[in-house]
Image (cartoon, rainbow, N blue to C red):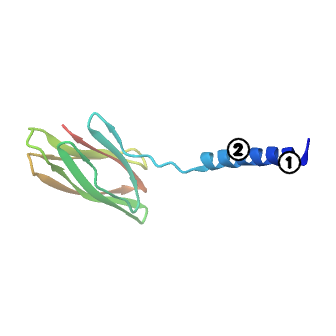
């Protein structure tokens, strides 16, 4: 095989290998899932979230310290549709219930401040 052919073949193989490595090493970011109007959001220490779905909105800040996670936030009903907006979920440490915070009636807003052992939480926003 000639020098030019060998060099071309090596360059092509090197490019294919490096390209494949870069594609497989690319980070992925999961977007919140929305199924039937339910927004699913995993959160950890330092996160600030402001999800919204048709008829509801919420916002919360997650902080951690001394082995505990704390979620401070609110949920608001944004539609005069006879439904209510809810934030509910579970704690990541042991899957214990976060409970449900419900705001019913257009413009109604409910605040919450909850903490639990661990460093993650799974929260959901829905309108029911």
Q: Residue at x 12, y 38 (%)?
A: 83
Residue at horizontal 32%, vertical 39%? 34
Circle 1 SS class? helix
Q: Disc 1 and disc 2: Cα gap in Å?
A: 18 Å
Residue 57 percent across, percent down from the top left: 21, 50
Crowding at dot 1, Cα within 10 Å, few <14 / some 14-19 / many 20+, comes out as few
Left or right of 70 in this view: 128: left
Instruction: Between residue 65 and residue 10, name the one nearer to us.
Output: 10
User: What percent of the width, then of the height, locates residue 55?
Assistant: 17, 43
Q: Residues within 10 Å of mark 2 (few under 14, many from 20)?
A: few
Q: The N terminus appears in which quarter of the rendering? A: top right
Q: Is residue 128 visible?
A: yes
* Camera-side residue of 110 and 34: 34
Q: Nearer the viewer, mark 1 or mark 2?
A: 1
**Residue pointed to by mark 1:** 4
The extreme top residue here reads 36
Marking on residue 48: none
Quarter residue 72 falls in: bottom left
Left or right of 123 in this view: 3: right
Q: Nearer the viewer, residue 9 or 96?
A: 9
Mark 1 / mark 2, whichever is N-terminal: 1
Q: Tell me which residue sits at (89%, 48%) in the image.
A: 3
Q: Position of residue 11 (x, y in %)?
A: 77, 49
For residue 54, what is the image quadrant? top left
Any part of residue 113 in sight: no
Residue highlighted by disc 2 = 16
Could you say whether the residue bearing mark 2 is in a helix, strand or loop?
helix
Question: Above or below — where is 59 with respect to 17?
Answer: below
Residue at the extreme right: 1
Q: Position of residue 65 (x, y in %)?
A: 40, 66
Q: How many marks?
A: 2
Whether residue 25 sits left or right of residue 4 in the image: it is left
């Amino acid at each position: 095989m000639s020098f030019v052919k060998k060099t071309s073949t090596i360059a092509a193989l090197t490019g294919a290998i490096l390209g494949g490595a870069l594609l497989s090493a690319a980070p992925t970011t999961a977007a919140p899932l929305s199924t039937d109007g339910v927004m699913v959001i995993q959160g950890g220490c330092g996160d600030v979230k402001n999800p919204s779905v048709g008829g509801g909105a919420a916002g919360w800040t997650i902080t951690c310290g001394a082995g505990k996670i704390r979620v401070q936030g609110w949920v608001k009903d944004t539609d005069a549709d006879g439904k209510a907006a809810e934030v509910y979920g579970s704690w990541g440490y042991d899957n214990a219930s976060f409970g449900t915070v419900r705001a019913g009636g257009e413009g109604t807003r409910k605040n919450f401040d909850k903490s639990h052992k661990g460093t993650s939480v799974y929260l959901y926003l829905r309108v029911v």
